[in-house]
Amino acid sequence: MVLSDRVLMGPGPSNLYPEVISAFTRPLLGHLDPEFLEVLDETCDRLRTVFGTENSLTLPLSGTGSAGMEAAFVNTVGPGDVVVVGVNGLFGERMCDVAQRLGADVVRVDAPWGEPLDPGAVVGAHRAPTVIALVHAETSTGVRNDVEEVARGKGDALLLVDAVTSLGGIVFDADRWGVDLAYSGTQKCLGVPPGLSPFTVSDRARARLKDRPPSWYFDLGLIARYVEGEGGRTYHHTAPVSMVFALHAGLGVLLEEGLENAWARHGACGHALQTGLEKLGFELVAPAQYRLPQLTTVWVPDDLGGNSEADVRAALLGRYGIEIGAGVGVMAGRAWRIGCMGHTARMRNVELLLGALGEVLGR
Amino acid sequence: MVLSDRVLMGPGPSNLYPEVISAFTRPLLGHLDPEFLEVLDETCDRLRTVFGTENSLTLPLSGTGSAGMEAAFVNTVGPGDVVVVGVNGLFGERMCDVAQRLGADVVRVDAPWGEPLDPGAVVGAHRAPTVIALVHAETSTGVRNDVEEVARGKGDALLLVDAVTSLGGIVFDADRWGVDLAYSGTQKCLGVPPGLSPFTVSDRARARLKDRPPSWYFDLGLIARYVEGEGGRTYHHTAPVSMVFALHAGLGVLLEEGLENAWARHGACGHALQTGLEKLGFELVAPAQYRLPQLTTVWVPDDLGGNSEADVRAALLGRYGIEIGAGVGVMAGRAWRIGCMGHTARMRNVELLLGALGEVLGR
């Protein structure tokens, strides 16, 4: 079967940097090969730069972004621990589910989907939670939550942040803000395929990690003995070598461009896309001040000329090879999610999408 | 940094089939793209053939082989459930650790490292366990355990088998034997990089899967709604698309060769390697009847001419670019593990290793 060549403008994955594809073609190394360990170390260094941190425990976790979420909770909370979760979209909901399965006492602080969380409500929800958790960039709604403001009021709690769709696309500054645990995914603004979860843990959080958490695979204490290798590397599981090569290359592209320049590029593309969508008559879901440039959510227009919203997405895919995302959760069938992330975040893709969407909708 | 091109003859990863490297170079597809779902479906079909099963729930899990182990236990056992584990190496030990963290009541049945398990002792260890678990091919010792014989006596228990190093290298016949859950890794006899865990669940086991297991990421009920997609695909986590392309290609190579032929190739290479090692004066760890062809463990000779065992491995790596594995657990420093798996399982690599080892040891 000959597969298509897509322009990936959904909520992730995004298109790959060419250098990432090249990195996949090099012969494999063993996970304990001194040369691979150099690549891994350099990958962790690059992740520190991208997260804005000097955390020693910074690494690519061997799973997707959702694995990062699970690892963050399983190492910090257990039965009876109080976790405050800000919920204004699918991934905040998921955090509640993950924490509840671990026996945590979850205190939800809701905001409507499409609106940002109220930082004051989040930090004021409980006197002394073990963890305060929120999503930085809600992939389900295109809304940015104010992590910095929540961090200011976190008190003694650990601050756990989902940076899956934010990392590399907008400012993320773990150390300056005071983020204790953060995880991301490789397939959004980093321009790498899905499969790894960039992960960082502050020294403050590290001192409180659960001893012998219920998950062996995500036990950060054991993983650290391989990744950091003080006094020799201790095998834990076999690292996903090719995916680490790919991430190493993607981060190399990002850092050669410069983080600030990459943020500016995502910002410019997002602005052009959003302006163009409004000109086409679309209503944007997120309020301007909290609107993500890298992921835009629009309400599906009432009049689609007799087509369903799925027909429109199928037309974009079939006629132009462009993937955009459907709405999820309370927005299923009512919204579209248009990503412009990583290597996809180019003006040529913005122009293409606006032209194609206009043509398909007859506007 | 220019990286080396290795001959990977450790306990995994092994060298990649060229077709796997090609598969990595194709542009990415989204995880909900109809074309990707076709590739995923075909990958699951190919896995059914390789596992020897018609299990509907057969899939590549989004983590390494160790993730497969965790998923197998987390979906089947919880606090108070009795799990009988056969332990004759590192991975049997790990099974105990994983199950204990989940609160299971673990009944160990030990055999010395380097010896096979006694199937009668395993099935006779408890009157009515929830799960009986064992490793088919112990990567730490090169010993094959008799899964078929344990399956015969499993009674009402679910039989959970680690097929990480066996799948594709020696006969594995899930349905005929009566295996209920099995997981593997991509980086051994399948010739694909580490990062996915081929996984299969019998209908019998499926009916007993835990509702709402403590792990969200490994919840097979949720994963099935994406992978099987009866009544539409429900997003769970973003599938590792590029790794699925790679696995699809590797399985394609394997099945075009034919499973029986691949087993024969691993068998012939292993036999030649083991005969050659004995000619060089090495003593093999595993008894002949239970010796894996794809992974050979030898005792480190007493006389290394003043070199340490690590010096010898470093010389093979430095002078010939050949990786072999160190001993682990009770065999650390005392044994070497020489793999001949996947694309590495070629007579030319056997000859090379024997020649290089003879030269380094001055034999």
Image (tube, coloured by chain):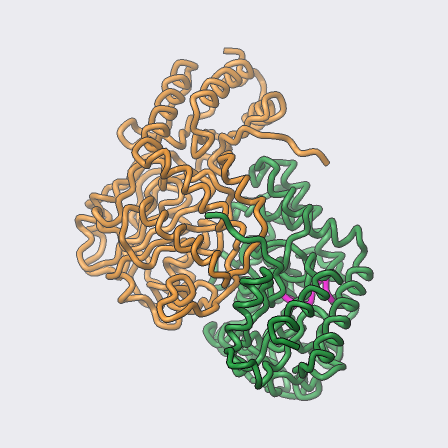
Chain colours: A orange, B green
Residue A111 vs residue A43, the one in the foreground: A43
Residue B306 vs residue B58, the one in the foreground: B306
Task: Single out the residue that lies furthest toward the front.
Answer: B362
A67 is higher (above) or lower (below) than B334? above
A48 is higher (above) or lower (below) than B279? above
Q: Which segment did they paint magenta?
A: B163-169
Residue B262 seen in the figure: yes
Q: Main secondary structure of the magenta part?
A: loop
Determine the residue positioned at 59% across, 75% down: B336
How many numbered discs sit on the rendered protein? 0
Is residue B168 found inside the magenta-colored segment of the image? yes
Q: In the rendered view, does A158 fall on the left or right side of B5?
A: left
Is residue A232 found inside the magenta-colored segment of the image? no
A31 is higher (above) or lower (below) than B112? above
- Work out which quarter of the rendered image holds the C terminus of chain B and state it: bottom right
The percent coordinates of residue A274 (x first, y second) are: 38, 22
The percent coordinates of residue A302 (x first, y second) are: 48, 20
Residue A343 vs residue B94, the one in the foreground: A343
Residue B68 seen in the figure: no
**Quadrant position of residue A97:** bottom left
**Quadrant position of residue A37:** bottom left
Q: In the rendered view, does B316 fall on the left or right side of B343?
A: left
The percent coordinates of residue B7 (x first, y second) are: 62, 59
The percent coordinates of residue B307 (x first, y second) are: 51, 78
Determine the residue positioned at 50% across, 65% down: A237
Determine the residue positioned at 73% across, 52% down: B46
Q: In the rendered view, does B314 fall on the left or right side of A102?
A: right
